[in-house]
Image: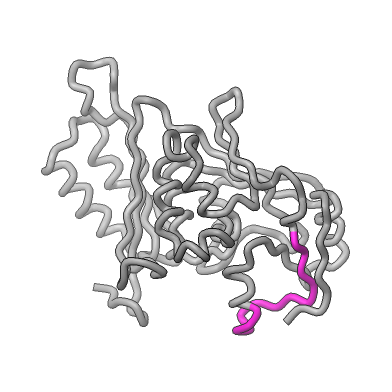
């Protein structure tokens, strides 16, 4: 377990501490994943840097360019209670509602869920479908990565030891878009996904037949080493109106994109 616990009051101070202590340090906010990993010995950290006393990191806002920004200490319950996210990022709000229990959602942060990088983590699929990006900062500078570049394997990311997630950003859903999130688990609450999926569809509102899909993003979690895009399934929906036949075809193609394994929760079949 840790030996030193810092509570900086600015991002710059947190980054300075990360640079000073390197791989021995970890950022902590809710701690719902990190503390379990430390207890089990799957992660090591001599130094913890608590960022919950840094102001304005728990904000959800829409900028003038139509981009939603979610701060690194926004909890799942804050996200679910955000009118902006419910109205303009419904897959994320719904995914946050399905995470854990009320107590866990009050503590756990979206950023923490992303950094843990389990392919079963619900907010990853939702945000990937929303085409989100992560902004990472260190004393060396700042960079912004797509989810495809950030996730490198099971619980493996491109986050450097001296970096901190400072922003999660994605385009707000437009009036011509619809999106949702779903998960299958062994029980109704406090359950890890056997499989989860998110979808964001864009429709052609200039035509009388407003059900014609012009763009689609479909993501699936807990079916491969990382959350994946079901690109062939997306292609099956684009260019035509939604119908039971089209949806069934897309579902079959999505199933073919998986690389499932047998584990303690479910078989690959």
Looking at the image, which residue sits at the far left?
245
Q: Is residue 267 above or below residue 94?
A: below
Residue 234, image quadrant: top left
Nearest to the observer: residue 6 or residue 195: 6
Give x and y (percent) for residue 142: 74, 44
Q: Is residue 32 above or below residue 180?
A: below
Q: Is residue 156 left or right of residue 207?
A: right
Q: Is residue 187 left or right of residue 212?
A: right
Magenta span includes 43: yes
* Highlighted magenta segment, given as a residue range: 38-50
Magenta span includes 112: no
Nearest to the observer: residue 78 or residue 167: 78
Give x and y (percent) for residue 217: 37, 42
Give x and y (percent) for residue 231: 34, 46
Q: Residue at x 51, y 68 (%)?
A: 154
Q: Residue at x 38, y 51 (%)?
A: 219
Nearest to the observer: residue 222 or residue 78: 78
Q: Is residue 158 left or right of residue 15?
A: left
Q: Is residue 205 above or below residue 225?
A: above
Residue 199, image quadrant: top left
Q: Point out the image quarter for the C terminus.
A: bottom left
Q: Residue at x 22, y 52 (%)?
A: 251
Q: Point out the image quarter for the N terminus.
A: bottom right
Q: Is residue 42 above or below residue 200?
A: below
Looking at the image, which residue sits at the far front?
103
Q: Residue at x 86, y 56 (%)?
A: 16
């Amino acid at each position: 377990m840790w030996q030193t616990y810092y509570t900086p009051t600015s991002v710059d101070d947190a980054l300075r501490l990360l640079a000073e202590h390197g791989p021995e340090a970890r950022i902590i906010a809710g701690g719902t994943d990190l503390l379990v990993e430390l207890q089990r010995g799957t992660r090591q950290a001599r130094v913890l840097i608590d960022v919950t006393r840094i102001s304005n990191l728990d904000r959800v806002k829409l900028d003038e360019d139509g981009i939603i920004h979610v701060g690194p200490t926004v909890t799942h319950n804050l996200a679910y209670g955000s009118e902006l996210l419910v109205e303009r990022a419904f897959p994320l709000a719904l995914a946050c509602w399905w995470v854990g229990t009320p107590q866990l959602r009050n503590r756990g942060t979206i950023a923490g869920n992303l950094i843990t990088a389990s392919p079963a983590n619900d907010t990853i699929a939702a945000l990937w479908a929303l085409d989100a990006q992560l902004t990472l900062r260190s004393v060396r500078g700042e960079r912004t990565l797509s989810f495809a570049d950030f996730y490198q394997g099971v619980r493996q990311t491109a986050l450097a030891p001296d970096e901190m997630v400072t922003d999660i950003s994605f385009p707000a859903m437009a009036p011509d878009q619809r999106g949702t999130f779903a998960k299958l688990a062994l029980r109704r609450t406090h359950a890890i996904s056997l499989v989860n999926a998110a979808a964001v569809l864009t429709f052609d509102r200039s035509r009388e037949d407003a059900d014609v899909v012009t763009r689609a993003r479909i993501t699936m979690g807990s079916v491969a080493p990382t959350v994946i895009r079901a690109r062939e399934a997306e292609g099956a929906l684009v260019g035509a109106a939604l119908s039971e036949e089209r949806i069934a075809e897309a579902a079959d193609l999505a199933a073919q994109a998986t690389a499932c394994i047998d584990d303690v929760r479910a078989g690959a079949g």
